[in-house]
Structures are given as C-alpha cells and as structure tokens.
Amino acid sequence: MVYRRHATRGALMVVGGVVLLAGLALLVLPGPGMLLVLSGLLILSRAIPSVERFVEPVRLRAVQAAEESVTSWWRLTGSVLTGVTLIGAGVLWIVETRLPFSGWSTGLGLVLSGLILFALLVWSHRRVRARRAARTGPRNPPEN
C-alpha cells in the first residue's frame, strides 16, 4: 500500500515535471507555454502540496497568454507544429532504444504533453471566439 502511494507520487512528479518543462520551452517558442506551465504546476501540486502557492498567479497569466496564443495564424501554426513535434518525439522515444532516457515513460510523457497542448489550444480558441462573439453580438441578427 505504501509502495503504491510512493509510486503514484513519483508518477505525478514525473508527468508534472515533463509538462512543466514543455511549458517552459513553449515560453520562448510559439505556443501556450503558460497553460502548460499551469498544468504542470497543478499536477505537481498533487504530489508536492507546497507548489500550490504558485498556481493562482500562474493561472491568471496563463489565461491571458492563452488568448494571445490563438490570436494570429503564425502563433497558432507554431503551436500546432510544436504539438506534432512533441507527439512525434514521444513515439520516437518509445520505439528507439538507443536514445538517452528512451522508454515508454519518457515517450508517454512527451505524447501526453503534445495532447495536452492540443487540448489547451482548442480551449483557448473557443474562449477567444466566445469573447469576440460576446463583444460583437450575434453574427446574423434577426430581421424585423
């Protein structure tokens, strides 16, 4: 029973760390880096409770950054390419045994990071669209 708790905590730390590192990389690359940083911190806070104090300030900045990440086509394209690269690298790390730290755990972490990136992009895009629709009103107003 104790081993399972330690294994779960270790897995949360590894997955949270991978997501956090991917988010930090995306802070300098095009993509919603702050959202991945937030996701990584949320996962890590389940394993390390003291990390929770960083969540709210990052959450506020992440929402702002998420909206910015889908406002132009080149940022959106860069984010999609980054997600595809993460998933491709994850598959490569699972299949190729000669790579450093190769194996299913590293590969799965990368694939999961890519999938999280795509989920966050969809969420960001819907949020921005909803805000624009709220500001401009309905696209086709009913005729009198």
Image (tube, rainbow, N blue to C red):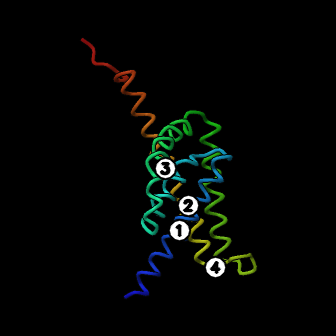
Q: Amino acid at mark 3?
A: Leu
Q: Which residue is mark 4?
A: 103
Secondary structure at badge 3 equals helix
Secondary structure at badge 1 equals helix
Mark 1 or 4, nearer chain start: 1
Tag 3 and tag 4, C-beta contact below 8 Å? no
Other-residue count near label 1 (Cα within 10 Å), few / some / many at <14 / 14–19 / ≥20: many
Q: Which residue is mark 1?
A: 15
In the image shown, does 113 or 76 lie closer to the viewer?
A: 113
In the image shown, does 11 or 54 lie closer to the viewer?
A: 54
- Using the numbered discs, state the Cα–Cα distance from disc 3 to disc 4 in whole angstroms: 26 Å
Mark 3 or 1, nearer chain start: 1
Tag 1 and tag 2, C-beta contact below 8 Å? yes
- Using the numbered discs, state the Cα–Cα distance from disc 1 to disc 2 in whole angstroms: 6 Å
Q: On residue 120, which mark appears?
A: 3
Tag 3 and tag 2, C-beta contact below 8 Å? no
- Which callout, 3 or 1, points to the residue nearer the camera? 1
In the image shown, does 107 or 80 lie closer to the viewer?
A: 107
* Percent x, y of residue 137: 35, 22
Q: On residue 121, which mark appears?
A: none
- Which callout, 1 or 4, points to the residue nearer the camera? 1
* Percent x, y of residue 40: 51, 59
Q: Amino acid at mark 1?
A: Val
* Percent x, y of residue 107: 61, 71
- Using the numbered discs, state the Cα–Cα distance from disc 3 to disc 1 in whole angstroms: 17 Å
Placement of 115 over or under 34, stated as above or below: below
Q: Amino acid at mark 2?
A: Val
Secondary structure at badge 4 equals loop
- Using the numbered discs, state the Cα–Cα distance from disc 3 to disc 2 in whole angstroms: 12 Å
Q: On residue 19, which mark appears?
A: 2
Q: Is residue 79 left or right of residue 54?
A: right
Other-residue count near label 2 (Cα within 10 Å), few / some / many at <14 / 14–19 / ≥20: many
